[in-house]
């Protein structure tokens, strides 16, 4: 097996259409169980990247995810969840996808094959030397992503990547590669499955660890989360009740007045 193309190797299973529903589900689950083990092997690489990103972000830098297809959508998902979860401005973590925002819902033909467009998309964000570009591509050979990372590095930005093959062109193009080799997919080449799951897990680790290091978590709580719905308000009230040992009514009044859990915990008045 060519270790550089494990995402494209044939499934370990044949005649999928002849399987019962129970067999399909059990086998997918069996394959999914391999993902966490593969991701665990990447922890040193993730640590290296995070420890380089944090000081840059403390100096005003941003994280820019860039990918195509499923990989691009996962980057956008992670970026879009940082503001409501950690109370950071939407400009702090960006997600870019080949083909633009329209490609989030519908594939844009051949967009991922344009080696020049990735950097052009990044340029729209007016990148600076404190920014970090993280290319996401299961195959590790997507031209849109490789071109973006290469140009970002040429222009003095720090670069990392998440891929699911070893020694890929993308890994070689960036400074801090993360390679989670999950093996063949249940449906041959369908990298939205195990590869996508691995990428999501790694993105969770990157953004969450960065935000913790930036002081956006207190104890184990999302004290800077945005209070955008009833569920989150209730969660904030519960945090305050637990920390300050006051009534639910007092906690809700304080939270709505202050606007954030952190403000209540650091300067409680009611």
Image (spheres, rainbow, N blue to C red):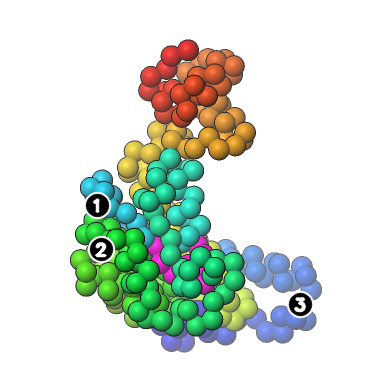
> Circle 1: is it few (<14), some (14-19), or many (20+) Cα within 10 Å?
some
Q: Are marks 2 and 1 in contact (CB under 8 Å)?
A: yes
Give the camera-side residue of 14 and 222.
222
Q: Which residues are magenta?
A: 65-74
> Circle 3: is it few (<14), some (14-19), or many (20+) Cα within 10 Å?
few
Instruction: Report the residue at 46% width, 78% height from top.
Output: 112
**Helix, strand or loop under label 1:** helix
Horizontal and vertical percent for residue 160?
32, 66
Q: Is residue 209 above or below residue 150?
A: above
Main secondary structure found in the magenta portion: helix
Q: Is residue 181 above or below residue 84?
A: below
Specify whether residue 66 is painted magenta: yes
- Circle 1 is placed at which residue position? 56
Specify whether residue 12 is painted magenta: no
Spatial separation of the CA atoms under disc 2 and disc 1? 9 Å
Q: Is residue 29 left or right of residue 242?
A: right
Which dot marks residue 19?
A: 3
Which dot marks residue 158?
A: 2
Label 3 vs 2, first from the N-terminus: 3
Instruction: Report the residue at 48% width, 53% height from top.
Output: 80
Horizontal and vertical percent for residue 201?
48, 58
Residue 47 visible in rendering:
no
Spatial separation of the CA atoms under disc 1 and disc 3? 51 Å
Residue 259 visible in rendering:
yes
Instruction: Report the residue at 54% width, 18% height from top.
Output: 253
């Amino acid at each position: 097996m060519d270790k550089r193309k494990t995402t494209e190797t044939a499934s370990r299973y044949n005649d999928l259409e002849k399987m019962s529903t129970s067999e399909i589900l059990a086998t997918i689950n069996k394959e999914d169980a391999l993902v966490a083990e593969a991701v665990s092997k990447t922890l040193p690489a993730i640590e290296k990247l995070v420890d380089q990103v944090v000081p840059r972000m403390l100096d005003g830098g941003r994280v820019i995810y860039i990918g195509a297809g499923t990989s691009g959508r996962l980057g956008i998902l992670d970026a879009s969840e940082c503001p409501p979860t950690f109370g950071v401005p939407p400009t702090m973590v960006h997600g870019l996808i080949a083909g633009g925002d329209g490609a989030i819902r519908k594939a844009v033909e051949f967009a991922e094959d344009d080696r020049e467009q990735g950097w052009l998309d990044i340029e729209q964000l007016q990148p600076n030397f404190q920014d970090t570009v993280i290319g996401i591509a299961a195959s590790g050979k997507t031209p849109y992503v490789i071109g973006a990372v290469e140009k970002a590095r040429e222009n003095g930005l720090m670069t990392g990547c998440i891929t699911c093959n070893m020694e890929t062109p993308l890994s070689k193009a960036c400074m801090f590669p993360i390679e989670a080799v999950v093996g063949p997919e249940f449906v041959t080449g369908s990298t939205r499955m195990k590869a996508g799951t691995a990428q999501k897990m790694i993105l969770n680790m990157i953004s969450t660890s960065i935000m913790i290091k930036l002081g956006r978590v207190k104890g184990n709580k999302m004290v800077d989360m945005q209070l955008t719905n009833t569920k989150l308000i209730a969660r904030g009230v519960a945090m305050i009740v637990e920390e300050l040992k006051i009534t639910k009514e007092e906690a809700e009044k304080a939270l709505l007045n202050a606007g954030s859990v952190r403000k209540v915990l650091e300067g409680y008045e009611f």
